[in-house]
């Protein structure tokens, strides 16, 4: 797919806010990168906020007890708190959010969903995802937790094809069934596009990155 987003409208006035990290995740095609650390820095509502990947979020954010597989505390870390405050302010201001891996999981929690606290087969490398349009793309993968959006308003846009994990562990180490493994989810109540993989690790011309950019334009801008 050719990149059709080289000259988006109002690019000079559009801010790509990146929470805590100086990484535009290929969204620089829409505007200028600004790294932000505090909600007061979200001054331009003609913008988007990126939540990046990283360590597990605290299950306290989605009000679940912790699984033995979760590498987080029962209370929020400093990073958890910073990103929750940034995201909540963005939601208040109507700024759309682009969540990557951990950021996607945090968005799911803020939308009222929860997490699968442990899965297998996603800890590295790449795999295929299938979209609601029937297309197949290869995405990068590096996570052992997963969005669990089934009980909240969401639009499942892409999923692992085939599913990679043989078990799905939630609170108190309970094992549940999963109809599909969510890879790309839109949460309309908080105007967030959640990407479980890592498009920022991939070449900008890769089909999956171009798919993500098309979704940003369709769902968020």
Image: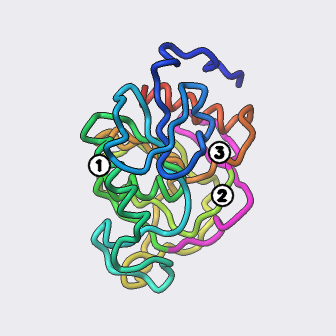
**Disc 3 + disc 1, Cβ < 8 Å:** no
Question: Which quarter shows the C terminus?
Answer: top left
Toward which corner of the image does residue 148 lie, by quadrant?
A: bottom left
x 68%, y 41%: residue: 137
x 48%, y 78%: residue: 70
Q: What element carries label 2?
A: loop
Total number of numbered labels? 3
* Residue 149 position in % (x across, y down): 38, 55
The numbered mark, 2 or 3, whose residue comes first in the sequence reads 2
* Residue 90 position in % (x across, y down): 32, 41
70, above or below 154, in the image? below
**Disc 1 + disc 2, Cβ < 8 Å:** no
Magenta residues, start to end: 118-139
Looking at this view, is 81 or 181 the one in front? 81
Q: Distance between the residues labelled 3 and 1?
A: 23 Å
The numbered mark, 3 or 1, whose residue comes first in the sequence reads 1
Q: How far apart are marks 2 and 3 (CA)?
A: 11 Å
Q: In this view, does 109 lie to the left or right of 104?
A: left
The numbered dot on residue 141 is 2
Q: What element carries label 3?
A: helix
The numbered mark, 1 or 2, whose residue comes first in the sequence reads 1
Residue bearing mark 1 = 88
Q: In this view, does 205 lie to the left or right of 47?
A: right
The colouring scheme, among rainbow, by chain, secondary structure or one colour, is rainbow
Is 4 included in the stretch rendered in magenta?
no
Residue bearing mark 3 = 200
Toward which corner of the image does residue 41 lie, by quadrant?
A: top left
């Amino acid at each position: 797919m050719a990149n059709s987003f080289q000259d988006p409208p109002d690019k000079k006035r559009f801010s790509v806010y990146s929470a805590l990290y100086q990484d535009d995740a290929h969204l620089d095609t829409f505007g200028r990168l600004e790294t932000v650390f505090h909600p007061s820095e979200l001054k331009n509502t003609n913008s988007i906020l990126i939540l990046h990947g990283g360590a597990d979020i605290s299950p306290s954010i989605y009000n679940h007890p912790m699984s033995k597989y979760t590498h987080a505390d029962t209370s929020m870390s400093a990073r958890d708190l910073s990103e929750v405050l940034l995201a909540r302010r963005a939601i208040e201001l109507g700024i759309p959010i682009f969540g990557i891996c951990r950021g996607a999981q945090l968005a799911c929690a803020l939308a009222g969903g929860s997490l699968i606290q442990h899965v297998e087969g996603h800890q590295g490398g790449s795999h295929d995802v299938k979209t609601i349009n029937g297309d197949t793309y290869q995405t990068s993968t590096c996570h052992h937790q997963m969005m669990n959006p089934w009980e909240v308003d969401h639009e499942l846009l892409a999923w692992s094809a085939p599913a990679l994990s043989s078990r799905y562990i939630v609170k108190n180490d309970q094992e549940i069934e999963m109809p599909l493994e969510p890879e790309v989810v839109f949460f309309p109540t908080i105007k967030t596009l959640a990407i479980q993989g890592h498009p920022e690790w991939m070449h900008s011309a890769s089909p999956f990155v171009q798919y993500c950019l098309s979704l940003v334009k369709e769902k968020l801008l």
